[in-house]
Image: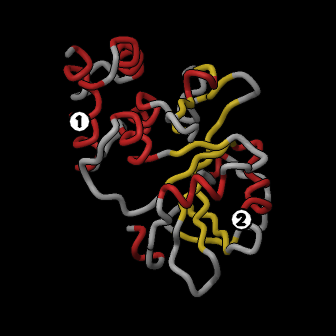
Amino acid sequence: MAATELGAWEPLPLAAAVELFRDAPLRWWISGGLALELHVGRSWRGHGDTDIGVVRSEAARLRDVLDGWDLHLASGGELTAWDGHPLRAEDAENNVWCRRDTRSPWTLDVTIGDGDRDDWIFRRDPSITLPWADAVLHTDDGAPYVAPEIMLLFKCREPRRAKDDLDAVTVIPMLDADRRARLAGWLPADHPWLPLTEV
């Protein structure tokens, strides 16, 4: 189901999202296409939402950060009011949609990431891990964002969307050799993005 079928979106501007989470008592990062833009330093397409990532074990603290907001679990093409219960990866509880109140459009998609104290862990394959210092980078003014190779790993699965392929052809050639090599090691052997990692 398309996001627009579950209600109107009016993405929170990135600067406002960063300010909202700046002092949050949890690990968080900018995610989605905006994270790729921050790494590259420019924009090449529009965005239908603003994504903020948090670690699963700390997700319940969202209710303190977004006190008074209307929060819904988005899973299986449905929205369910979220009461703060622990979010389970095995039940595909990986996104919380957020809006200021029930009459407002959705403004944030909080994506739930996995990890422990030391490492980010890829929820689709727990053998893929990365130290948090490498998994979450920072802009010059200190805003955290997910590393581009991680974001592209999430985007690489089938069926891919046109915007994912656009992101790949734009971003992968601009990655340093280490990040390209890391992504190449994570991609399936026959993936069409692999030639881009050889630039």
Q: Please give the residue where the numbered disc 1 appears in the rendered image.
A: 170
| Image quarter of residue 193 | top left
Return the disc, 1 or 2, that comes first in the chain's sequence: 2
Report if the CB atoms under discs 1 and 2 are less than 8 Å apart. no
Identify the residue at image location x=66%, y=53%: 21
**Which labelled disc corresponds to residue 66?**
2
Identify the residue at image location x=21%, y=28%: 192
| Image quarter of residue 127 | top right
| Residue 188 point in image, percent of width and height | 34, 23
| Residue 194 point in image, percent of width and height | 25, 21
Identify the residue at image location x=64%, y=71%: 80
Instruction: Indicate left or right for 129 with 50 as reference.
Output: right
- Per the image, label 2 sits on a secondary structure element best described as loop
Residue that protrudes farthest toward the front in the picture: 141
Q: Is residue 17 above or below residue 182?
A: below
| Residue type (three-letter) at the residue carrying disc 1 | Thr
- Per the image, label 1 sits on a secondary structure element best described as helix
Instruction: Indicate left or right for 61 with 148 as reference.
Output: right
Using the numbered discs, state the Cα–Cα distance from disc 1 to disc 2 in whole angstroms. 34 Å
The quarter of the rendered structure image containing the C terminus is top left
